Image (spheres, rainbow, N blue to C red):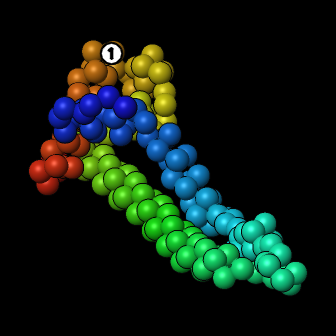
Amino acid sequence: MDILTSPTDYVEYLLKNYHSILNDLQQMKIELEHHEIETIDETIEGMSLGMAGTPPGGKSGLRDDTARVAMVFRNVNKRINTENKKRLEKQIASGEIELKKLHTAIDCLPEDTKNVIQDLYIKRLKWDQIAMRRYISNNTINRHRKKGIEEIARGFFFGEIVA
């Protein structure tokens, strides 16, 4: 990702990547819902069977060090799974908040500017389609685009939503 040097760069990044951000959020939600992790018992059983040996004296069974490794693994595995789940939940929440802020800022734009921003970024229409649909020139589209990005950035970063 490019370094975003200003609030308007960030807003433009969000708008240009709006659909990909939505898709990423959806994928993360699916991953969170259906995240299949090997159960701790399955992992420990696999480790135990792989590491079990026949100690001196011919008796088979788990060695003490294997049981200790398994217990340490159980704790580490639980911590890692918990941390990964929390990280994923935070990423989803953060992405959803950013998109809600974006939608709120778009909704507060003047009607013509709002329509152009939605047509360009949300509906993914081409400039020529917007020009024909709105009966405006490409220069006017560009003015609305720039104005919209600046106003959204002000709303995002400085709480100055202009209606």
Measuring from the top left, give residue 4's x and y in whole percent. Answer: 25, 33
Residue at 23%, 43% in the rendered image = 152
Q: Looking at the picture, which amino acid does disc 1 mark?
A: Ser
Can the viewer see residue 129 in this picture?
yes
Measuring from the top left, give residue 95's x and y in whole percent. Answer: 40, 54
From the viewer's perspective, tell me whether residue 4 is left or right of residue 131. Answer: left
Assess disc 1: are there few (<14), some (14-19) or many (≥20) residues with their C-alpha within 10 Å of its C-alpha. some
Can the viewer see residue 107 in this picture?
no
Residue at 44%, 62% in the rendered image = 87
Residue at 79%, 78% in the rendered image = 55
The residue indicated by pointer 1 is: 137
The image shows a total of numbered marks equal to: 1
From the viewer's perspective, tell me whether residue 27 is left or right of residue 55. Answer: left
From the viewer's perspective, tell me whether residue 134 is left or right of residue 142. Answer: right
The secondary element bearing badge 1 is classed as: loop
Measuring from the top left, give residue 70's x and y in whole percent. Answer: 64, 76
Quadrant of the rendered image containing residue 16: top left
Quadrant where the N terminus is found in the figure: top left
| Residue nearest the viewer, comparing 34 with 96 | 34
